[in-house]
Image: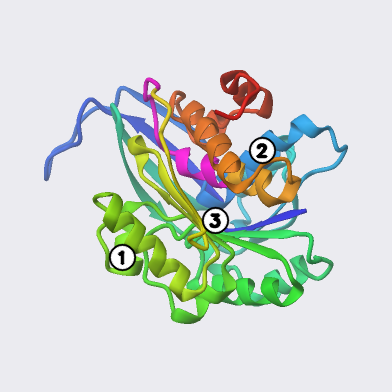
Amino acid sequence: MIYVLGSINNDISLELERMPKKGETIIADGCRMGLGGKGANQAVAIARLAQRYGTGHTAVKMIGHVGKDAVGSELINKLNALEVDTEFVRQVNRSTGTAVVALTGKDNRIIVYSGANLGVSKSDVDEALQNATGSDILVCQLEIPMYIVGYALRKARSIGMTTVLNPAPAKELPDDFYPNIDIIVPNETETQILTGINPRDPDSRRAAIREFHTRGVHYVVLTLGSEGSEISDDDRIYAHIPARQVRVVDTTAAGDTFVGALTLTYPHIGMYSFKEACLFATKAASLTVSRAGASESIPTFDEVCALYNHEIK
């Protein structure tokens, strides 16, 4: 089982010709509302990709909060419809988290109101992981309180679970986080904030990855947008994974798709090596950016396999 601890938001996406200037009002060309939040997006990615295996039960449990409002109830229903187990999603006396996404061509800018996400507590983690075992996985991001993420990583490690951290949005992490992280998946901005190294070229990227290893992280995946990713397994395996060239429509959930696909394929299913899992995740993310929206843009396993030509290349 994969447990995803993180944010659940109501996404409002506005399609703009350009970003407004200071004090300016402009008219949007389109508007969509839907399920979002990094935690929810990653849970949906895992669920959609796991459907291929026909296990007869959900592969992912979501841990998080939404408000006691109509929007919160709707988001829970959407998660359930997408085969995400919502047993540990609580409705609380705060407004449901909201994200406003401004889209202009290939660019997106996001403003987040955390709302109910800020109320996730240690007791939520304890209850959710009560029956977890060493064969399970915990996935975290940083859109809920930092100390809760740290607590969850420590608890998961004490159980023997595999832990995955997507350190987004970018924040400095306490030193004691790193020994409790098996796989870390930062982008360039997050890497620079966390390591102090600007990953602008292959040498600096490798230096940043080594810094993560020095701090205790076993697997590092440095995502580079259109340049693909740099990966390392305790510096024994080091490789560049090129991005697949596609027409970019919306990059909103690309990183979340990557994290979800990687988490599902390595080591949970065990069908891929670390490098092959990263290749799979790259192709899954490339499908996401070719579509509009957040969770609704995430592909199924069969869609990725069709793009994959059923081979690891």
Q: Which residue is mark 3?
A: 7
Residue 225, percent from left and from top = 36, 40
Which circle marks residue 240 in the picture? none
- Front residue of 300/118: it is 300
Q: Earlier in the sequence, mark 1 or mark 2?
A: 2
Q: In which quadrant will I find the C terminus? A: top right
Foreground label between 3 and 1:
1
Location of residue 109 with respect to 130 vertically, above or below: above
Foreground label between 2 and 3:
3
Q: Are marks 1 and 2 in contact (CB under 8 Å)?
A: no
Kind of residue at badge 2 = Lys
Using a 10 Å C-alpha cutoff, classify the residue at mark 1 as few (fewer than 14 neighbours), some (14 to 19) or many (20 or more). Answer: some
Kind of residue at badge 1 = Ile
Which circle marks residue 193 in the picture? 1
Q: Which residue is mark 2?
A: 78
Mark yes or no: residue 73 visible.
no
Kind of residue at badge 3 = Ser
Q: Under tag 3, what secondary structure?
A: loop
Q: Earlier in the sequence, mark 3 or mark 1?
A: 3
Colour scheme: rainbow
Q: Earlier in the sequence, mark 2 or mark 3?
A: 3
Q: Is residue 300 magenta?
A: no
Q: Are marks 3 and 1 in contact (CB under 8 Å)?
A: no
The image quarter containing residue 284 is top right
Residue 227, percent from left and from top = 34, 37
Using a 10 Å C-alpha cutoff, classify the residue at mark 2 as few (fewer than 14 neighbours), some (14 to 19) or many (20 or more). Answer: some
- Magenta residues (range): 246-259
